[in-house]
Image (spheres, rainbow, N blue to C red):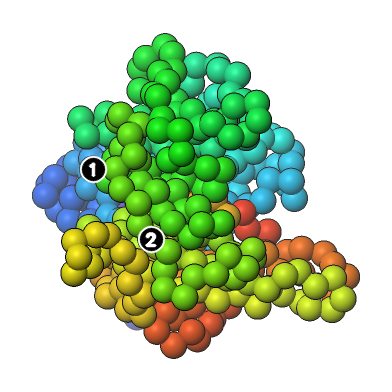
Amino acid sequence: MLRFWCCLGGTEVEKQVVERDWSSLPPELLNLFAKNLTEISDFVCFRAVCTAWRSSTPVTDLPPQFPWIIEMEFYNPIGPLRFHSLPLGKVHNFHNPQFVCKWHVLQSDGYIQISKYCLLKPLNNQHVHLPPYNFTAPFHWIGPRRNRLGEPVVHVISFDSLGCRPRLFSYHFGQDKWSELKLHSDCINREPVFYINHMLFNVQKFMGVTKVTEAATGTLAYVIPPVEGYSPEATQHSSEYIVDASGDILRVSQHHGPYDPYGHSEYNYRFDVYRLEVSKSGSECWVKVDNIGHQALFLDKYNSFVLRANDIAGIKRNCIYFLARIYDNNNVAFSRVERIDIETGAREHLLCPFEAKCWFVPSLQSL
């Protein structure tokens, strides 16, 4: 029981307040409270209050999250792993010896890659140890992603010693080895590869075509011709992304001019967005669009994904959230977070307190 005193008309009056047992709140009321916590850090704190609150709010009830930004690790090599939440303007610090001097590139379903053969989910410290394998450089990581059976799988595309013939490896969570799938000899080159709807999409910039390979079998499924007005010279300073947008497949071409060491303070970059459609002849083709509806694209050097603006507070529809690399007049690179309207091209600078490396979608669920 709690007591306190107040003064009424010069007379001290003792009041008694019955102590409440907050853990006895009805589960349906707790669940209602939790559904209004749009930030995962608040959700974690809510569940940490007591056993009753935690059992009433399963992690599957977590609403979709606004992506965090991961700090570039070489700017803070011995400190904590830091994430920035744009909506809150808040930095989250994760202290763990495994984060020190590690590289954090691969991110998917709340995992980051803290070493060549270890994935970690920072919010619940869940590790996935991958079997060692001496992949021939260069190689490209994809995943984890779920296959047609719903199993989480990590893919690695490697090349032979000459960097020509591609090799596709896959690791199913819980197994003790990598499996190699035989690839069509000409279906994938050294350009980035994207895993969409159990297919591997590879934009081959020299020819302008996009080759689509069945991930489960390694066979070439179909080839998408170049976009309208394609020229190899225009792709010398461009990056390509392919993302799943609620059933639509989008291709995003990020163009920038050549780096000028004599005074240009930033890349003069722009974006073209295309949607995969079927032409009148029945073949696949890329069609340029300037509206992706109530969705937003998130792009950086390593990741590309789409989120629905209606599902997440703070996201603006039909926009690209882009982590850019900017160069000052002393030829020193720094990062910049920008939001670009796809239809108008209007840009807005978003504040970030540190050097940004990549986007990260926080999650508590296990694959």
Residue type of the residue flagged with mark 2: Pro
Q: Which mark is residue 225?
A: 2
Q: Can residue 72 be seen?
A: yes
Q: Which mark is residue 263?
A: none
Residue 341 lies, in percent from the top left, at 44, 81
Q: Residues within 10 Å of mark 1 (few under 14, many from 20)?
A: few
| 349 sits to left or right of 188 | right
Residue 29 lies, in percent from the top left, at 14, 53
* Residue in the image at 52% along x and 42% along y: 189
Q: Can residue 122 be seen?
A: no
| 358 sits to left or right of 53 | right
* Residue in the image at 62% along x and 68% along y: 233
Q: Is residue 3 above or below residue 323?
A: above
Residue 351 lies, in percent from the top left, at 60, 72
Residue in the foreground of this view, choosing between 14 and 73: 73
First reached walking from the N terminus: tag 2 or tag 1: 1
Residue 121 lies, in percent from the top left, at 45, 36
Residue type of the residue flagged with mark 1: Thr
Q: Quadrant of residue 171?
A: top left
Q: CA distance from mark 2 to mark 1?
A: 41 Å
Secondary structure beneath disc 1? helix
The quadrant of the picture occupied by the C terminus is: top left
* Residue in the image at 52% along x and 48% along y: 192
Q: Quadrant of residue 111?
A: top left
Mark 1 lies on residue: 60
Q: Is residue 354 above or below residue 273?
A: above
Residue in the foreground of this view, choosing between 273 and 94: 273
Q: Residues within 10 Å of mark 2 (few under 14, many from 20)?
A: some
Q: Nearer the viewer, mark 2 or mark 1?
A: 2
